Image (tube, rainbow, N blue to C red):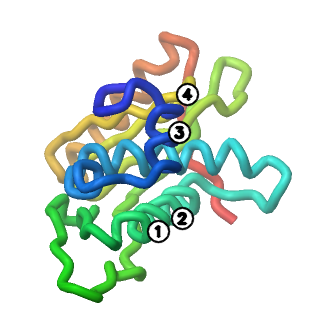
């Protein structure tokens, strides 16, 4: 995992302890924790109601907004710090800017990870207990070109992607 934490387990431990100012005001760290939390939620939802990764991301952002409310936070759509006045709450109705979510499947077509493409130009891959985010120019044409490359390259290493099935 490229970021503040060496693994999603470390990021989830930091979330459980409660993020401090350093996490809440650093977009890369916030996003790292949110994506790991979403991945964990998805893996943990086995016995309950089915959850899509998009729903897990939405719930993880909600938890991060609540955890960061006392110290301000980062507006995940603008990637900029949000300074809060005394008693002001972080808006609760801002959905993550997810354009597309894909299942990463192995050669036996079993799900092994997720690929999330956002309108901001970021693409996050969660697989094998970690999440990694890459950034690209935020244009639809660029995202489609990168997705086409992923569709070509993944099979050479035993994977392929398919759009996440929504309920």
| Residue at x 19%, y 59% (from the top left corner) | 79
Residues at discs 2 and 4 in contact (Cβ within 8 Å):
no
Secondary element at image label 1: helix
Residues at discs 2 and 1 in contact (Cβ within 8 Å):
yes
Quadrant in the rendering for residue 108: top right
The quadrant in which the N terminus is found is top left
Report the residue marked by disc 4. 129
Which one is earlier in the sequence, the residue at label 3 or at label 2?
Answer: 2
The quadrant in which the C terminus is found is bottom right
Which is in the foreground here, disc 3 or disc 2?
A: 2
Inter-mark Cα distance, 3 to 1: 20 Å
Residue 62, numbered circle: 1
Which is in the foreground here, disc 4 or disc 3?
A: 4
| Residue at x 52%, y 17% (from the top left corner) | 155
Which is in the foreground here, disc 3 or disc 1?
A: 1
Which one is earlier in the sequence, the residue at label 2 or at label 4?
Answer: 2
Report the residue marked by disc 3. 114
Locate residue 83, reporting x and y percent.
Answer: 16, 73
Inter-mark Cα distance, 2 to 4: 19 Å
Image: 111 above or below 69:
above
Q: Nearer the viewer, residue 45 or 24?
A: 24
Locate residue 52, reporting x and y percent.
Answer: 63, 56
Inter-mark Cα distance, 2 to 1: 5 Å
Report the residue marked by disc 2. 59
Secondary element at image label 4: loop
Locate residue 126, reporting x and y percent.
Answer: 49, 34
Q: Nearer the viewer, residue 157 or 28?
A: 28
Q: Nearer the viewer, residue 78 or 165?
A: 78
Secondary element at image label 3: strand
Crowding around mark 2 (Cα neighbors within 10 Å: few <14, some 14 to 19, many 20+) is some
């Amino acid at each position: 995992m490229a970021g503040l934490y060496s693994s999603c387990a470390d990021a989830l431990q930091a979330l459980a302890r409660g993020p401090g100012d350093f996490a809440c005001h650093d977009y890369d760290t916030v996003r790292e924790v949110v994506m790991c939390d979403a991945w964990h939620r998805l893996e943990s939802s086995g016995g309950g109601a089915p959850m899509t990764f998009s729903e897990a991301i939405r719930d993880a952002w909600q938890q991060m907004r609540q955890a960061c409310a006392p110290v301000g936070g980062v507006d995940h759509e603008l990637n900029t710090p949000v300074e809060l006045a005394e008693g002001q709450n972080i808006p609760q109705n801002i959905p993550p800017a997810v354009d597309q979510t894909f299942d990463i499947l192995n050669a036996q077509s079993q799900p092994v990870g997720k690929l999330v493409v956002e309108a901001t130009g970021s693409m996050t891959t969660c697989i094998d207990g970690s999440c990694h985010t890459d950034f690209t120019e935020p244009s639809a044409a660029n995202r489609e070109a990168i997705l086409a490359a992923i569709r070509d390259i993944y099979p050479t290493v035993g994977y392929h992607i398919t759009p996440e099935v929504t309920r």
